[in-house]
Amino acid sequence: MNLSETARLLGAIAAFDRRTVGDSDVIAWQSVLPDIPFDDALAAVRGWYGVNTDWMMPAHVRRMAEEIELKRRRAEAKWAPGQFGVPKDQAMPEISGPIIEDELPPAVSSLLAKAHIRAILPEGSREALMPRTVAWEREHKAYLRTRDAEPNPLYRPGGGRGYAADEVWVDEIAEG
């Protein structure tokens, strides 16, 4: 972005938040945003003031313009996500749940049957394939055990050594 584009950008920002813009503001903003395309910066301003009431700073413009560029590059990518080298129109569908062998495409079923690939594939543990999912499930089970647990029948509220909460406990202390 050059100085005149930066001045136009600050004019657009000033239209939203009524800030005053001088030559020093233009120079300061341009020194931070020289590599940002004007159209992306203007789109970032529109996006920012569409959802925020705070003042926009150069860091906000840079961050949002980089997100716009990233979305543009992803849309222009020739390869399917996660399948480098495979054109988008030939990409395999994403696996979203457990695989049921009867629902596999015929090409995959025949490959598994003919090449005996299943016999040479190592047994993979679920934890090795999806470590975060397994860890989350373990944490969730521990939480559910704690949340749904029965009260401890041996727990005595306020019970420290020498404290008698009921008659039975007093007798145990006297005998002990």
Image: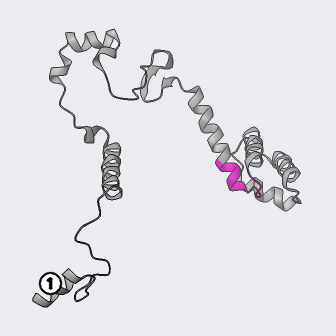
Considering the numbered disc 1 on the image, is that residue within a helix, a strand or a loop? Answer: helix
Is 53 magenta? The answer is yes
Quarter of the image containing the C terminus? Answer: bottom left
Closer to the camera, 161 or 122?
A: 161
In the picture provided, is 37 more to the left or to the right than 3?
Answer: left
Provide residue 132's location: percent of width, then percent of height.
35, 46
- Residue 168 can be seen in this image: yes
Count of marks, rendered view: 1
- Residue 176 can be seen in this image: no
Point out the stretch of residues depicted in magenta. 52-63
Closer to the camera, 127 or 101?
A: 101
Quadrant hosting residue 171: bottom left
Quadrant hosting residue 74: top right
Provide residue 50's location: percent of width, then percent of height.
76, 45
Q: Is 172 situated above or below 37?
A: below
The residue shown at (26%, 12%) is 111
**Residue that label 1 marks:** 172
Q: Is 124 situated above or below 154?
A: above
Provide residue 114's location: percent of width, then percent of height.
20, 9
Is 145 magenta? The answer is no
| Residue type for callout 1 | Glu
In the picture provided, is 114 more to the left or to the right than 17?
Answer: left
The residue shown at (22%, 71%) is 154
In the picture provided, is 48 more to the left or to the right than 79?
Answer: right
Please identify the residue farthest to the front as the structure is shown: 167
Q: Is 167 situated above or below 14?
A: below
